[in-house]
């Protein structure tokens, strides 16, 4: 009998980031590839004293105390939200998946930034979404371009990462945030705002969620604890406008019943403790120092090779190369010399929008390794571009 799988299975793709991370687990590799928190900055997971009740099944919406803390925080940011419209998810990645299930049929149109978060392209693509990428500048997407794209495509929703965007690190200006909200209110198109990096801020910039400015358009706001605590807990959250919440809860129920209760209980205790503010201050100080170390190394080694700007927050530098380069071939060469980065091309929703670029994470490597690793990558890119390498059509990894 012939095995018959769904059409969704035909659209499944491997994550290049996950493939790279498997390779970079070997000792001695300097990795700028994944958005990994520094091991030494993650809090210890002490579950002592948590109630035995958390061993039992729990509410699909999440633990009430954690939902209340999340709602209080969102309210301080100007988001119209109470605990009854907070859903705790198994990582914010599950929130993206639930949005896909709620909105996307085969052929549904989705607008997002170009470049954008690679896993969103994968997650929504499985459900048959068709993408249009909105060109991205340091101040955000252009509101007029957004309006034209909405008129042309009538999308199911717009997906944006306005604060310390992945992969670019860009942070939308206040003017652009307000203008985008106005376009969405006038057209009625839902906004999916992904905001996992907002707490990792190294210099003062506007970080007001676009959702806070919406008056009529439906919205979903996605958040995460992975970048500021321990990603292995797999605890994230979403909040939404009232008309979307019940559907998201039902989809969550059918997916995994509820997020792990022990992790939620630990987070509630940690977020409420005196040690949390100290933890965040140390994390921001160390990551800021590593950002500065990478900026200094790039200035020493990448002059003439790329254009970039130091991010005001988040975890990534985005380098636009000044010459054509097969960045996947460069990655293969880099891995043989025990250094890794993320090629930029897979972050684009459409092939014709791609340009040669690199994403570099600065949070996971020590400053001395940042200097050495950046020097190696610059050397390898110089060798590749001197040979006139063309870009690879489809990313794959064999090391």
Image (spheres, rainbow, N blue to C red):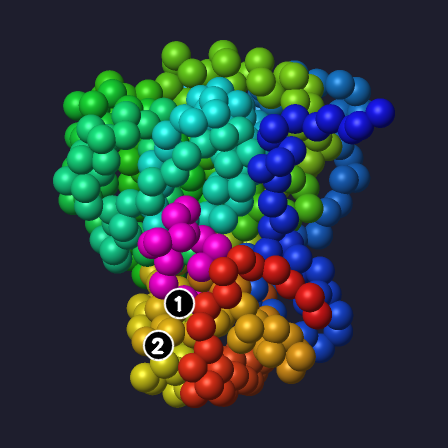
Residue 262 shows in the view: yes
Tell me the tag on residue 236. none
Residue 126 falls in image quadrant: top right
Residue on which the image places disc 1: 356
Marks 1 and 2 close (CB-CB < 8 Å): yes
Q: Secondary structure at mark 1?
A: loop
- Foreground: 159 or 350? 350
351 part of magenta stretch: yes
In the orientation shown, which residue stands out farthest toward the front? 1
Residue 52 in picture, x, y percent from top left: 81, 25
Q: Against 399, is 169 above or below?
A: above
357 part of magenta stretch: yes
- Residue drawn at (66%, 57%), measured in percent from left and top? 19
- Residue drawn at (69%, 23%), measured in percent from left and top? 256
- Residue drawn at (32%, 76%), measured in percent from left and top? 322
Residue on which the image places disc 2: 323
The residue stretch that appears in magenta? 345-363
Residue 253 in picture, x, y percent from top left: 64, 17
């Amino acid at each position: 009998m012939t095995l018959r799988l769904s059409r969704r299975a035909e659209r499944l793709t491997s994550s290049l980031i996950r493939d790279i991370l498997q390779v970079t687990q070997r000792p001695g590799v300097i990795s700028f590839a994944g958005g990994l928190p520094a091991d030494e900055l993650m809090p210890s997971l002490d579950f002592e004293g948590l109630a035995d009740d958390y061993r039992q099944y729990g509410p699909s919406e999440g633990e009430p105390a954690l939902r209340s803390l999340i709602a209080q925080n969102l309210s301080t940011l100007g988001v119209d939200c109470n605990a009854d419209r907070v859903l705790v998810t198994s990582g914010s990645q599950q929130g993206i998946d639930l949005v896909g299930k709620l909105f996307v049929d085969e052929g549904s149109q989705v607008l997002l930034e170009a470049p954008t978060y690679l896993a969103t392209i994968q997650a929504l693509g499985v459900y048959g979404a068709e993408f249009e990428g909105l060109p991205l500048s340091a101040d955000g997407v252009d509101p007029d371009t957004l309006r034209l794209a909405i008129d042309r495509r009538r999308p199911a929703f717009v997906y944006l990462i306005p604060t310390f965007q992945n992969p670019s690190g860009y942070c939308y200006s206040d003017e652009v945030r307000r203008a985008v909200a106005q376009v969405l209110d006038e057209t009625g198109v839902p906004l999916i705002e992904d905001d996992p990096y907002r707490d990792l801020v190294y210099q003062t910039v506007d970080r007001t969620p676009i959702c806070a400015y919406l008056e009529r358009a439906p919205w979903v706001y996605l958040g995460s604890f992975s970048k500021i605590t321990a990603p292995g807990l797999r605890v994230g959250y979403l909040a939404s406008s009232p008309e979307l919440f019940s559907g998201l809860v039902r989809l969550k129920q059918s997916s995994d019943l509820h997020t792990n209760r022990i992790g939620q209980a630990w987070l509630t205790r940690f977020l409420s403790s005196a040690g949390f503010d100290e933890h965040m201050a140390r994390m921001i100080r160390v990551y800021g120092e590593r950002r500065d170390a990478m900026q200094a190394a790039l200035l020493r080694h990448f002059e003439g090779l790329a254009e970039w700007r130091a991010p005001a927050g988040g975890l990534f530098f985005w380098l636009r190369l000044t010459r054509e380069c097969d960045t996947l071939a460069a990655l293969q060469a880099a891995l043989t010399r025990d250094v890794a980065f993320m090629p930029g091309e897979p972050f684009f929703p459409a092939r014709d929008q791609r340009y040669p670029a690199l994403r570099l994470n600065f949070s996971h490597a020590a400053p001395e390794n940042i200097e050495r690793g950046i020097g190696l990558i610059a050397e390898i890119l110089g060798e590749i571009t001197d040979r006139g390498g063309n870009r690879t059509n489809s990313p794959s990894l064999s090391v």
